[in-house]
Each structure stands twice: as structure tokens, then as C-alpha cells.
């Protein structure tokens, strides 16, 4: 007999972090990465600065219209809270769908894990906790971004309504814990689903239970109050929204709200270790094969399973090389890892928009909005536009990801570079446009005026189109610049900031509140921006084509 | 964490499978009732055409994939019931190896040592031996993501051998190696076999199987069609019939039997 030693969970966690830090270190050595980060922060910083300047610094006589725009219009009122509430609900529902369709740890596992970790004598829970712990910094970073973004709003509340900052600290902590509990719960559901699929009877029973849970969870999330024993008990997400709505509407907390928040906090603090224990138990029950399943599924079909494979798409070819390229891009784009989840998310977005539109008369009845709130729309759109632009540009900035073979095929087929650029542009455009449209509907419906949908649709896609073209024009330079090492800093350092500001500045100036706008002005602005964005898009695609011409 | 396990008995075969079967979705039977018995200290080649089920068999042997039927024993441990113990004795090199791109080669080797709790002095001794053998000394400070395919293969082999598992399962180990690397590997196989290690390698290159291994199993469409020693194999070759001719005739005979 001998003692058999195995690696501890902590050792695995240490190595996960070691790799993460190496990854960050490598990324920071890339000038392109640094520049993108700096510009993204600069843009967010600019927005925060403008908000701060307009709310706190501008003299009263100059501030009046802007102050009205930001405060009386509802930007800091119930509307924005309802908006936040809608978005949180949406995310919650999407999380449930993710649990149903996808692999919760898909973003944390790597193909190398199969060869290295899964063949090692490890307990399944060690692998899970290593991966889960590694994912925490990513979520924390997201929270830091959120806190920074809401800082001016929190400062405004603190000053205007004398709300202690501790309240916000608790609220943020509650939100973070909610996310953690959600992450553990989705993983546990996945484990149960995987470990229960073997015997047929239990598989069916489990699926039935799972779908029932899904149905009731969705109902609970979409219904603001659960009546128990004659009392309304708001669920965590709604309790937060209620607290903030009460704060915004009359400057005081609702009678139950501080109690509700504290109860939620205590509840989550108790629930979190329970969820940890359950996750550990069900992970071990599912066994290490679970991760092989996650990895192979992610590699083969993306984090969402079985949705797109059921869509009867097949590659037929087309009458011209360009159309063949577009067809190929559509087919492979749809089959790429992660895309199925996007499409499921978009589908959920559209379903919720339909529900919101149907409910809009009720919303207006319950929460009648002053007509002044219309002015709130362009501000919010422009904020979104400014925040969304660099993010979308980054998303589109690698047109050849996983498609290194395409370049040779394109060259052999003699497709002109401009057609390659347009093809890639169209491919990248589809998803963000589909996401942008429901957002436009949200704003319009939540503001209680469906007429704003037209305005929203006129304005919002500009950000999407421009940022996608920007991403393509920059991304097309990567392979070229990588070959001639010195080109990276020169081309990207000059082009990215210049293009970013050229794209964003006029839109920001026009819409961010320097001009107080009614609907008429917004429409004029959108017409102006249409010409502007078409011109910019053509220039950017031309730049991309030029880069393709020089590629080897 | 520690637990007590029984030592594997020396007389138990290195690898033994009974009626091993694997069914993929859409009713694709990748492996069908495969029986293998591979002793200690031999190099055994699993030979077969593309899609024969070699990789699936190897993945089941190392515990990456669960069979729908059958059992697997590694050094006497049941891979399905005593997977934790069985994994201690087995090492795997996949056909298209992935690497942790954000780890340097040196860090990767340390990672393996840490994962399998190899004592520091043993690690240092093995590290210097295999790093020198595979000539990756000048690459140890490079990120694995920046290595060429051949160098990556050498580094992964080095990581595998640092563990010195009793049973080494290697899927197409020669695939990315240059002639010199291939030569080193062949020599190493012989040395390891002499030290008592068992090597199961898959290949569809007959000359590699013939040159390196003492035993072979030919599989086609998930079914074993021939097995024996290389000497047995050679005994079938007479009068201008090459090893390749013999192999092809076995496979075609099997395919005809399946089709009829």
C-alpha cells in the first residue's frame, strides 16, 4: 500500500491565475491592444466628464436647458430605472436560456484542458472551482466598469437626496452576489442535465422538470411581485429596482425598501455557500467527463448546443465568386462557436420587445410620462452610441479569425479587395443591427411613445454601421501589419484614435445635449448623420480594401 | 489531498479491454466489441485507416470518453470504476495536441510536475534529460503559443515523459516531427520499453509500426481485424508481397465482408 497524492484545488487555481496573468502580460505587450484599451477608456471618460460637467459645473443660467434635459426629462428618474430594470430582466432571462442551451463554463475552458487536466487524476470539483475562480476577475472587472459608469449618477443622488454611499455599496454588492449565485446555479443545472441524460426515464423526467423550472423562472422574473400570504414580496432584482424607483420618484426610500435590500443581502450571503456546496456535489456526480463535454461541445458547436445544427442550411455555391464568398461567410458565420447563443439572445430580445409593445398602454396608464421626456431619447441614444462604438469596432476587428485559409481562396478566385471588404462588412453587420433594433424599441416603448421608434431606428444603426466599418478597416490591417512588425504601432497608433474621433465627435456634439432637441431636430440630425455615415463607411471600407491588396 | 491505494500488481497487463464499444450520435458505431491485451514493457501499434476508431479507442483508454459497453483495465485498475487510480498510471499524447498558449515551455513542464506532484529533485533530473534529448533547451523561455508545430510536439512529449507514466498512449506521435525528432522518438520508445514502460501508439504509416513496435493490432471500422507480433505479420509476406499489400488485402477483405 502507498499514499496516492493528487493535486489540490488550490494548485489548479494557482496555475489558472498564472496563465491568466501571462495572458494579460502578453496582451499588454501588443501596442494595438493597449491603444484600443486607452481609446475605450478615453471615450467612456469623455462621456463621464461631460455628464459631470453639465450636472455639477455649468453655471445655472447656462445649465438650465441641459439640467432640464438630464434631470427633468427623466434621465435620473423613474424612466431610467425602468430601463435598467428591463435590461436586468432581459439579462436574467438570457441567463436562464444560457443554462438551458449552453455550457456555463464554455468561456473558461481551453482545448488544452482535455489533454492536460482531464487525463490527470483529479476530482471534477477541483476542475470546476479552478475554472470558476478564474472567471471571477472577469465579472469583477465588469462591475468596476459598471460602477465607474454609474459614479456620476450615484454622486448626483448622494447630493440631491442625501442618500448615503453605503446604500450604493450594498446595492452593488447585492448585484455582484446575484451574479455569482446565478453563475453557480446555471453550472449546477448543467451538471444535473448532463448526469441525468443516461437512463431514458430519468432523462425525460429531468427534461420535463427543467422545462417547468424554466417556464416558472421566466414568469417569476417577468412578474414584479410575488404575492405570499397577502403581502407583496419583490424578488431581488425587482426589489432593487423598486428601491431605486422610490428614491427617484419622491426622494425617499419606500417604507419596505431598506429592509428589503438588507434582507436580500443576508439571503444572498446564506445562499452563496449553499450554491457552492450544491455545485461541488453535482459536479462530482457528473464527473470529469462533464468538462470534456463542455470543451468538445464548445470546439465543435459553440457554447450553445443543437440550435443552429437544426437549421437546414447547406452550402450550395452561387453564380459568382463574390456571392459564393458571401454564402460561405453566412454559413460558417452561423456555425461559429457562440453564434447560436447570440441568435437565441436576439430571439429573446424580440419576444420581450413584442411583450413590451403589447403592454405599452398599461405602462402608460400606470406610469404616465410627461411629454418633456421625449428629449431624453436623443441623449440616451447618443450615450449608447458613444459607448457601443468602440465595443463593436473591437468585435469586428478580426475579420480573419479562424479563417486564415480564406485569404488564399479569395486570391485564387480573384475577388477584388473591395468586394472582400464589403463581404466581411455585411457579415459583421447582421448581428449588431439585429441587436440594435430591439434596443430602439425598448427606449421607445419605455418612454411611452411608439412614434419614437422611427427616430430611434433612424439614429441607432449609424453607430453600428460606422463602428463595424471601422473594425473591418482596422482588422484588415492586422495580418498585414503582423508580417511587417513595425507597421503595427505606426498604422494602428495613428489610424485608430483619428478614426474614432472622426466618427464619434460630430455625433456626440450633435446629440449629447449641446443642442436641445425635439423630434424634428432629431430627424434632421439623423438625415445629416445618414450622409455622414455613408461617406465614412465608404472611406473605411476603401481603407480595408487597400489593406487587403497589400496582404500576403 | 492524500488517499491510500493498492499498488498495481506486476503481473496485470498494462492495458486490457473487454468488449469495448463506443456509439456516437446518429448511430455511428466507432468501436465495436474491441478486446485488447497489451503486456508490460512492449511497444504496441494500433494500425488502421482514417476513421477506423483508433483515436476513439485511445480516448476511452485514457478516460476522456466513456464507452457504451465494455470495460478497460490499466495496470489492473478499472478505468470506469477506479478512474482516479488508473489515471495515475497512464499518459496521453493526442493526435492534434493543444497547448496552453500563455504558458512558457518551462512553466508548462513545471505545471505538469505540479499536477502530478513530482518531487523537485526527480523533476530536475528528468527535465534536464528530456529537454536535452528533444533539443528544446533554447525554447524553454518561449510561450507555447509561439512554437512551431514540431517544437510544440517535442515540448508536449517532454511534459509527458517527465511524468514517466507506466503506460504511454500516443496518437500519431510522429506526425509533426522532423526525421531527426522521429529518430529520437523511436530510440526512446525502445529505451522506455526496456525500462518496463508500455507504449501504445496509433499510426496509419506501416513502416513506423513495423520499425518501432513489437506487437500490433489492425482495426477497421471499429473492429479488430488482425493482431499479433510483427514477426507474425512478416510471416505472411512471401513471394514479392509487401507488408503494405498484406495490410490492404486484410482491410479490403474486411470491408467486403461488412458490405456483404
Image (cartoon, coloured by chain):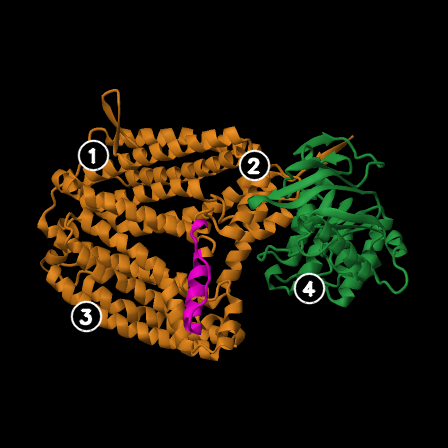
The region drawn magenta spans A310-334
Label of residue A253 in the image: 1
- Give me the chain that's orange: A
- Mark 4: few, some, or many residues within 10 Å (few <14, many ≥20)? some
Label of residue A528 in the image: 3
Quarter holding residue B147: bottom right
- Mark 3: few, some, or many residues within 10 Å (few <14, many ≥20)? few
Examine the structure image and report whether residue A320 is included in the region drawn in magenta: yes
Q: Residue at coordinates 19% horizontally, 62% vertically from top-left?
A: A511
Q: CA distance from mark 3 to mark 4?
A: 57 Å
Label 3–label 2 contact, CB within 8 A? no
Q: CA distance from mark 2 to mark 4?
A: 34 Å
Q: CA distance from mark 2 to mark 1?
A: 43 Å
Residue labelled with disc 4: B150
Closer mark to the observer between disc 1 and disc 4: 4
Q: Is residue A176 visible?
A: yes
x%, y% of residue B77? Answer: 74, 35
Q: CA distance from mark 3 to mark 1?
A: 44 Å
At mark 2, the secondary structure is helix
Residue at the top extreme of this rendering: A229
Report the number of numbered marks.
4
Q: Nearer the viewer, residue A410 or A514?
A: A410
- Of the residues under marks 3 and 1, which one precedes in the sequence? 1
Q: Is residue A54 visible?
A: no
Amino acid at each position: 500500500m502507498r499514499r496516492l497524492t493528487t493535486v489540490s484545488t488550490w494548485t489548479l487555481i494557482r496555475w489558472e491565475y498564472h496563465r491568466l496573468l501571462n495572458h494579460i502580460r502578453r496582451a499588454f505587450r501588443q501596442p494595438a491592444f493597449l491603444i484600443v484599451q486607452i481609446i475605450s477608456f478615453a471615450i467612456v471618460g469623455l462621456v463621464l466628464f461631460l455628464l459631470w460637467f453639465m450636472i455639477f459645473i455649468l453655471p445655472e443660467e447656462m445649465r438650465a436647458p441641459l439640467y432640464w434635459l438630464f434631470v427633468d426629462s427623466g434621465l435620473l428618474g423613474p424612466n431610467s430605472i425602468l430601463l435598467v430594470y428591463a435590461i436586468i430582466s432581459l439579462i436574467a432571462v438570457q441567463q436562464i436560456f444560457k443554462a438551458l442551451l449552453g455550457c456555463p463554463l464554455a468561456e473558461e475552458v481551453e482545448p488544452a484542458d482535455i489533454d492536460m487536466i482531464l487525463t490527470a487524476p483529479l476530482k471534477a470539483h477541483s476542475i470546476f472551482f479552478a475554472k470558476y475562480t478564474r472567471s471571477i476577475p472577469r465579472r469583477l472587472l465588469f462591475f468596476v466598469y459598471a460602477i465607474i459608469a454609474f459614479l456620476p449618477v450615484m454622486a448626483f443622488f448622494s447630493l440631491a437626496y442625501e442618500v448615503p454611499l453605503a446604500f450604493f455599496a450594498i446595492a452593488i454588492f447585492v448585484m455582484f452576489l446575484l451574479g455569482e449565485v446565478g453563475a453557480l446555479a446555471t453550472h449546477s443545472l448543467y451538471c444535473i442535465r448532463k448526469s441525468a441524460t443516461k437512463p431514458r426515464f430519468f432523462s425525460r423526467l429531468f427534461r420535463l422538470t427543467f422545462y417547468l423550472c424554466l417556464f416558472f423562472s421566466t414568469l417569476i422574473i417577468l412578474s414584479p411581485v410575488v404575492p405570499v400570504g397577502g403581502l407583496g414580496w419583490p424578488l431581488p432584482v425587482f426589489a432593487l429596482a423598486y428601491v431605486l424607483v422610490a428614491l427617484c420618484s419622491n426622494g425617499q426610500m419606500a417604507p419596505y425598501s431598506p429592509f428589503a435590500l438588507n434582507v436580500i443581502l443576508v439571503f444572498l450571503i446564506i445562499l452563496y455557500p449553499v450554491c457552492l456546496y450544491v455545485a461541488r456535489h453535482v459536479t462530482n456526480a457528473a464527473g470529469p467527463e462533464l468538462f470534456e463535454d463542455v470543451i468538445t461541445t464548445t470546439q465543435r458547436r459553440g457554447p450553445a448546443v443543437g440550435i443552429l445544427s437544426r437549421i437546414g442550411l447547406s452550402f450550395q455555391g452561387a453564380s459568382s465568386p463574390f456571392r459564393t464568398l458571401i454564402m460561405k461567410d453566412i454559413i460558417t458565420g452561423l456555425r461559429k462557436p457562440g453564434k447560436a447563443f447570440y441568435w437565441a439572445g436576439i430571439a429573446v430580445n424580440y419576444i420581450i420587445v413584442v411583450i413590451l409593445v403589447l403592454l405599452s398602454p398599461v405602462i402608460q396608464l400606470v406610469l404616465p410620462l410627461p411629454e418633456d421626456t421625449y428629449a431624453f431619447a436623443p441623449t440616451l441614444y447618443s450615450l449608447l452610441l458613444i459607448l457601443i462604438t468602440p465595443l463593436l469596432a473591437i468585435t469586428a476587428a478580426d475579420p480573419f479569425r479562424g479563417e486564415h485559409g480564406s485569404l488564399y481562396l479569395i486570391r485564387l478566385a480573384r475577388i477584388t479587395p473591395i468586394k472582400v471588404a464589403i463581404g466581411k462588412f455585411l457579415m459583421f453587420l447582421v448581428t449588431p443591427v439585429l441587436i440594435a433594433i430591439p434596443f430602439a424599441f425598448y427606449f421607445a416603448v419605455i418612454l411611452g411613445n411608439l412614434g419614437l421608434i422611427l427616430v430611434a431606428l433612424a439614429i441607432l444603426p449609424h453607430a453600428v454601421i460606422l463602428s463595424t466599418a471601422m473594425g473591418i478597416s482596422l482588422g484588415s490591417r492586422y495580418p498585414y501589419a503582423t508580417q511587417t512588425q513595425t507597421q503595427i504601432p505606426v498604422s494602428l497608433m495613428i489610424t485608430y484614435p483619428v478614426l474614432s474621433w472622426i466618427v464619434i465627435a460630430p455625433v456626440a456634439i450633435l446629440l449629447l445635449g449641446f443642442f436641445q432637441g425635439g423630434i424634428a431636430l432629431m430627424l434632421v440630425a439623423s438625415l445629416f448623420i445618414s450622409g455622414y455615415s455613408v461617406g465614412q463607411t465608404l472611406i473605411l471600407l476603401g481603407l480595408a480594401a487597400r489593406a487587403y491588396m497589400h496582404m500576403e | 489531498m492524500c488517499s491510500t491505494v493498492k499498488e498495481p500488481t506486476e503481473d496485470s497487463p498494462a492495458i486490457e479491454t473487454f468488449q469495448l464499444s463506443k456509439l456516437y450520435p446518429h448511430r455511428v458505431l466507432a468501436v465495436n466489441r474491441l478486446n485488447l491485451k497489451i503486456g508490460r514493457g512492449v511497444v504496441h501499434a494500433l494500425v488502421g485507416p482514417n476513421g477506423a476508431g483508433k483515436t476513439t479507442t485511445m480516448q476511452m483508454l485514457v478516460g476522456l470518453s466513456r464507452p457504451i459497453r465494455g470495460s478497460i483495465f490499466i495496470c489492473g485498475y478499472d478505468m470506469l470504476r477506479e478512474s482516479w487510480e488508473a489515471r495515475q498510471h497512464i499518459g496521453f499524447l493526442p493526435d492534434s495536441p493543444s497547448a496552453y498558449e500563455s504558458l512558457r515551455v518551462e512553466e508548462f513542464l513545471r505545471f505538469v510536475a505540479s499536477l502530478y506532484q513530482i518531487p523537485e529533485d526527480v523533476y530536475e533530473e528528468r527535465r534536464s534529460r528530456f529537454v536535452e534529448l528533444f533539443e528544446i533547451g533554447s525554447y524553454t523561455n518561449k510561450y507555447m503559443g509561439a512554437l512551431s508545430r514540431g517544437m510544440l510536439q517535442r515540448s508536449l512529449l517532454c511534459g509527458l515523459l517527465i511524468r514517466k507514466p507506466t503506460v504511454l498512449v500516443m496518437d500519431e506521435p510522429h506526425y509533426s516531427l522532423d526525421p531527426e525528432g522521429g529518430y529520437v522518438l523511436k530510440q526512446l520508445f525502445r529505451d522506455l520499453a526496456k525500462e518496463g514502460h508500455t507504449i501504445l501508439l496509433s499510426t496509419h504509416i506501416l513502416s513506423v509500426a513495423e520499425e518501432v513496435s513489437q506487437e500490433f493490432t489492425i482495426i477497421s471500422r471499429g473492429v479488430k481485424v488482425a493482431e499479433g507480433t510483427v514477426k507474425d505479420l512478416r510471416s505472411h509476406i512471401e513471394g514479392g508481397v509487401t507488408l503494405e499489400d498484406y495490410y490492404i488485402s486484410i482491410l479490403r477483405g474486411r470491408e467486403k465482408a461488412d458490405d456483404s
